[in-house]
Amino acid sequence: MTMTLPPDCEESLRQLVADGAFRTLDEALREAMRLLVQSVQDSHDAEAEARESGQPLFPDRIDIDELARQQGVGPVTDISSLVGDFAPDEENVDEWLQELRMLRKGKVPETRR
């Protein structure tokens, strides 16, 4: 079988091989396909269970105001209440964003190794 992958997918798989997660590109692709098939199968199983039990696959939608009432929350009246003070002073926002981008690409930044 021959497959043509989107360039970003192929690059992600190649990076996993380069990082040592897999020995070969074929091995990485086989694992990705196995996970995809498993995900689809799990989804079909969930749909079948929902049909058999008579439960809807997705519950009825609820009005956002009703949800807020149920959770005991209301509108924000003071924007300063949303300010958090949880980041260390020495952490640079640009460095943090760069690290986040690397993690999203499946790369582990040097500072986390």
Image (cartoon, rainbow, N blue to C red):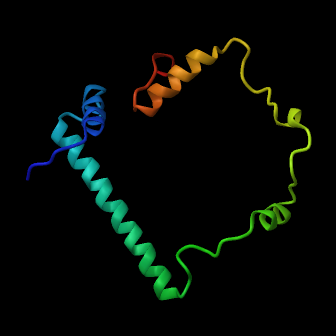
Q: Is residue 89 left or right of residue 108?
A: right
Quarter occupied by residue 44: bottom left
Q: Residue at x 91, y 43 (%)?
A: 77
User: Where, by quadrant of the figure, is residue 5 drawn?
Assistant: top left
59 vs 25, nearest the viewer? 59
| In this rendering, position of residue 29 left or right of residue 107 | left
| Residue 65, position as x, y percentages in the image | 81, 63
Residue 36 horizontal side relative to residue 66, left or right? left
Vertical placement of residue 87 versus 50, above or below: above
The furthest residue to the top? 90
Q: Which residue is at a point 29% across and 39% down the rendered structure image? A: 9
Residue 53 appears at what percent x and percent y?
Answer: 52, 87
Residue 33 x, y percent position in the rendering: 25, 52
Toward the left, the furthest residue is 1
Q: Quadrant of residue 85?
A: top right
Q: Name the residue rendered at 34%, 64% in the picture.
A: 40
Where is residue 84? Give x, y as percent.
Answer: 79, 30
Is residue 102 or residue 17 the one in the foreground? 102
Nearest the viewer among 59 and 103 is 59
